[in-house]
Image: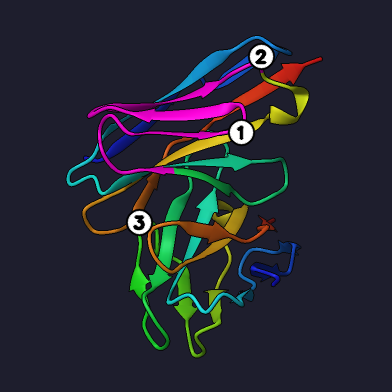
Amino acid sequence: EDQVTQSPEALRLQEGESSSLNCSYTVSGLRGLFWYRQDPGKGPEFLFTLYSAGEEKEKERLKATLTKKESFLHITAPKPEDSATYLCAVLRGDYKLSFGAGTTVTVRA
Amino acid sequence: NAGVTQTPKFRVLKTGQSMTLLCAQDMNHEYMYWYRQDPGMGLRLIHYSVGEGTTAKGEVPDGYNVSRLKKQNFLLGLESAAPSQTSVYFCASSYQAEQFFGPGTRLTVL
């Protein structure tokens, strides 16, 4: 059965304290892995797509990496505006997305 | 461009009532999706459409129906609402792999 697991569930950081979020998956026929940001009361906002192991993408303080079994979202020197829930999703062989439950990041000034 | 819009934003229903959620997109996307999001769980696909006039079941389709009469609109219907359908509903659309989401509808069924 396809599974997407994100850890930790919640992460509290001090401003400037770098950390990483994990997304592990067991999916048959992975066609891509996506990271989304979701602010309270809003819909998910697309961040990155990764298609193959070894691929990396960066955007401001965020960097996403992909291996054959997991992806990491690294947050470097976070600011309070980086506080959000980060969702991982995998595009399966049938072209449907399977989402993880998310990691809620809180960055304190 | 408004992107993906959803109406209404909030709704409270009594058990057994019916309602329709409307999703509209102005990006000329072929693919549209309805998800529900519950605490501690990932977004789960209810129904989806690969083009005007087509619909297909997702992971959790029971108790819901959909229609895609126009390319830009995707409607989600609840014929007889149940408390288990209390959730936040998101619509999304895509041209290729990346899906773009609407702001969501918070539905409470009493």
The chain holding disc 1 is A
- Which residue has dot 3 on it? B59
Left or right: residue A75 versus residue A65 is: right
The residue type indicated by label 3 comes to Glu
Left or right: residue B94 versus residue A90 is: right
Quadrant in the picture for residue B95 = bottom left
Nearer the observer, A5 or B88: A5
Q: Residue B78: in sight, yes or no? A: no
Nearer the observer, B28 or A89: B28
> Helix, strand or loop at disc 2?
strand
Q: Residue B100: in sight, yes or no? A: yes
- Which residue has dot 1 on it? A85
The residue type indicated by label 1 comes to Thr
Q: Distance between the residues labelled 3 and 2?
A: 33 Å
- Which residue has dot 2 on it? A12
Over which residues does the magenta segment extend?
A: A49-77
